[in-house]
Image (tube, rainbow, N blue to C red):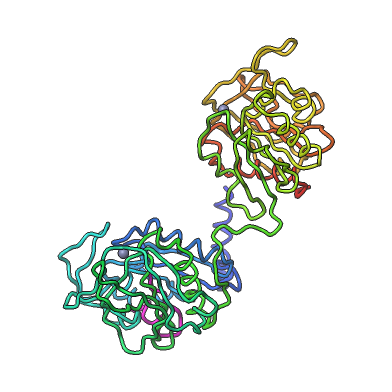
């Protein structure tokens, strides 16, 4: 109904002779960022794993707005218009005449091109490669402008372009003063293929090379690895590195690639000498995650991952408590099961000192069964207990795996605020005791579950949270659950109010 009304309004609008408005670029792109389009979708290499990394690295710096096309064949001048840089992670057959013209005019007209690893192989005299490093007997007419842009082509004539066995080697700068190389160490290590015998085009400016050792089948020469080139008004950066994700993840590849992308766009480089692929804030909340005593899916470790404000160390009990934790940590996250007699007295004291010092505690899932005989712990601190064995008047608690349940966050608390009602596939607990004066964060509708399944303890000296869901992969992979637990960590560290 509503749709029909909108349609009618639009028809009237156009009928009245008013021109449809052009949507500005900023509607689609972040303002002030370098716009990058990665061309991929075909490669004899594993483009499905490397393309997300090439994107991720640029995203991490905050300087780029990155898009990906897996069908470059359909590109036109119009689709390329908003972009500043094309990154070629492509090795395969030629594109349509229209797409090739668009790419060539893009670079010639003053935009940037970055060619990664096998992209230099493409569109030349050599046979078209198939997926998974396969060869074919297919030959195409070379796209000569591509070689002119990239700055080199491959040849099957002697000496054949190619590489010896992949191995670890050093890449050294030939021009350490270029904006891409300035401030970087004189050499960097990588394990990669070392391409040799490129047919270089005149005018290419070699930035870095590597020695192609005859010991493993190399030609005994320094081979150009990284270079820049000019094509019309455009700038080009080529990296022969990046055979696979292992090669790309080396800091040397990562930083030279990212700086290369910035340079072709802006003719200068502002990126640092190292791209931190797991960036953490200086004052990130320091979490000690304690495991042990209960098996769990490894996916659990993902729950606290990927956030700048949270830095996590994992240590199993009892050794997790061997030192005074107050200086090193802000929040203790317990995902373990342990009883009092399994923890030496000094370790217990360290735990107590930490909790009484006003630091945060987040108890997850099966850790509600910790310290059944330590009243201070379960009555005062957690204000809850999964009763392992009936302890009159408390009946034994029960559990059930693989339950499809609907859970509802309570509004009003910073941890649960704004979280949607959610469907979980998880383990439920029933007859878990909790203190009457807890602040409930989450309830379940399921008959096999207690209604209250997450709460804040009334414990006055520190902020203590319990969250019951989190048995397996199905829950731990959920952004909703990750947000819930991460918010609990931040709130217990007094970073969220
Ligand atoms: Zn390769
Ligand atoms: Zn469980």
Q: Quadrant of residue 271?
A: bottom right
Looking at the image, which residue is at 40% across and 65% down?
190
Residue stretch in magenta = 101-116
Is residue 422 found left or right of 488 in the rendered image?
left
Q: Quadrant of residue 7?
A: bottom right
Q: Confirm whether residue 49 shows in the render.
A: yes
Looking at the image, which residue is at 58% across and 32% down?
292
Magenta-colored stretch includes residue 385: no
Q: Nearest the camera: 120 or 248?
A: 248
Ligand 2: image quarter:
top right
Q: In the image, is residue 327 above or below residue 147?
A: above
Q: Quadrant of residue 237?
A: bottom left
Q: Residue furthest left?
A: 137
Q: Nearest the camera: 196 or 424?
A: 196
Q: Position of residue 2 (x, y in %)?
A: 59, 50
Q: In the image, is residue 422 above or below residue 368?
A: below
Q: In the image, is residue 299 above or below residue 202?
A: above
Q: Residue furthest right?
A: 460
Q: Confirm whether residue 17 shows in the render.
A: no
Q: Position of residue 182 (x, y in %)?
A: 53, 80
Q: Position of residue 132 (x, y in %)?
A: 27, 57
Q: Position of residue 278 (x, y in %)?
A: 56, 57
Is residue 352 found left or right of 420 in the rendered image?
right
Magenta-colored stretch includes residue 111: yes
């Amino acid at each position: 109904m509503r749709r029909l009304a909108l349609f009618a309004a639009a028809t009237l609008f156009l009928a009245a002779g008013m021109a449809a408005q052009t949507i500005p670029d900023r509607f689609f792109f972040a303002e002030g960022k370098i716009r990058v389009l990665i061309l991929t979708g075909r490669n004899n290499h594993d483009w499905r794993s490397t393309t997300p990394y090439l994107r991720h690295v640029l995203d991490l710096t905050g300087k780029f707005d990155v898009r990906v096309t897996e069908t470059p064949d359909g590109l036109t001048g119009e689709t390329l218009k908003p972009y500043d840089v094309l990154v070629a992670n492509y090795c395969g057959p030629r594109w349509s005449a229209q797409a090739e013209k668009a790419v060539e005019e893009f670079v010639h007209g003053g935009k940037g091109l970055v060619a990664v690893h096998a992209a230099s192989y493409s569109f030349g005299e050599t046979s078209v490669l198939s997926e998974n490093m396969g060869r074919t007997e297919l030959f195409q007419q070379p796209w000569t402008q591509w070689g002119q842009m990239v700055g080199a082509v491959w040849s099957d004539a002697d000496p054949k372009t190619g590489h010896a066995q992949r191995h670890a080697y050093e890449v050294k700068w030939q021009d350490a003063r270029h904006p891409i190389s300035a401030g970087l160490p004189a050499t960097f290590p990588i394990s990669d293929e070392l391409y040799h015998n490129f047919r270089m085009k005149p005018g290419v400016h070699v930035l870095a090379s590597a020695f192609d050792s005859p010991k493993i089948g190399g030609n005994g020469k320094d081979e150009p690895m990284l270079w820049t080139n000019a094509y019309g008004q455009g700038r080009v950066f080529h990296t022969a590195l990046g055979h696979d994700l292992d090669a790309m993840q080396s800091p040397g590849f990562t930083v030279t690639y990212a700086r290369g992308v910035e340079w072709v766009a802006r003719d200068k480089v502002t990126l640092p000498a190292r791209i931190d692929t797991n960036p953490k804030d200086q004052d990130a909340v320091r979490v000690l995650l304690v495991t042990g005593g209960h098996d769990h899916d490894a996916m659990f470790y993902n729950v606290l991952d990927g956030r700048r404000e949270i830095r996590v160390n994992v240590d199993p009990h009892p050794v997790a408590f061997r030192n005074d934790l107050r200086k090193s940590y802000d929040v203790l996250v317990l995902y373990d099961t342990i009883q009092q007699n399994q923890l030496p007295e000094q370790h217990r004291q360290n735990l107590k000192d930490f909790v009484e010092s006003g630091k945060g505690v987040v108890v997850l899932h099966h850790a509600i069964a910790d310290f059944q005989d330590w009243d201070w712990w379960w009555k005062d601190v957690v204000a809850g207990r999964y009763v392992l064995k009936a302890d009159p008047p408390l009946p034994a608690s029960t559990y059930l795996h693989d339950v499809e349940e609907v859970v509802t966050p309570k509004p009003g608390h910073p941890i649960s605020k704004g979280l949607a009602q959610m469907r979980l596939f998880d383990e439920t607990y029933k007859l878990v005791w909790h203190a009457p004066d807890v602040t409930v964060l989450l309830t379940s509708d399921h008959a096999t579950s207690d209604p209250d399944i997450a709460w804040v303890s009334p414990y006055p000296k520190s902020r203590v949270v319990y969250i019951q869901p989190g048995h397996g992969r199905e829950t731990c992979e959920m952004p909703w659950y990750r947000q819930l637990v991460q918010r609990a960590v931040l709130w217990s560290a007094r970073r969220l109010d």
